[in-house]
Image (cartoon, helix red, strand yellow):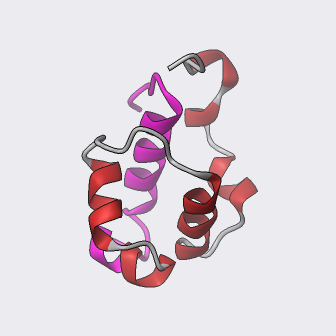
Amino acid sequence: METPKTINEAIVCRINQLLNGPIQTQYALAEISGIPYPTIKSIMQRRTKGITLKTIIMLAHGFNMSVSEFLNDEYFNYELLDLES
């Protein structure tokens, strides 16, 4: 498992992990979540500087889970994240 350093990297890692399930493409995630595909692509290419709570909520919805379920992963372990970045 890749160890993310920032919250944005943790979100990218989590999306990659979840894309191995029923939703397998960024395009499908965009369609289901309502997040424009260019935004998903930008997040995944780590060009997005700050991912908003609204986007996290929409991502969770796209994966058919609650925000708590989306964030309930080792990637979001407080001790492993650089919260200053």
Q: Quadrant of the N terminus?
A: top left
Q: In terms of image quadrants, where is residue 67? A: bottom right
Magenta region: which residues? 1-28
Left or right: residue 73 compared with residue 45: right
Question: Residue at 63% across / 55% down in the picture?
Answer: 70
Question: Residue at 44% across / 25% down in the picture?
Answer: 3
Q: In terms of image quadrants, where is residue 23? A: bottom left
* 44 over 41 or under it: above or below: above
The verdict on residue 24 being magenta is: yes
Question: Residue at 43% across / 68% down in the picture?
Answer: 21
Question: Residue at 60% across / 65% down in the picture?
Answer: 60
* 42 over 38 or under it: above or below: above
Question: Residue 54 location in percent, x, y?
Answer: 62, 61
Q: Residue furthest bottom?
A: 31
Q: How many marks?
A: 0
In this rendered view, identify the residue nearer to me: 65 or 33. 33
Left or right: residue 40 compared with residue 33: left
Question: Residue 80 location in percent, x, y?
Answer: 58, 18
Residue 13 visible here: yes
Residue 25 visible here: no
Question: Residue 48 location in percent, x, y?
Answer: 36, 44
The verdict on residue 15 being magenta is: yes
* 41 over 26 or under it: above or below: above
In this rendered view, identify the residue nearer to me: 50 or 22. 50
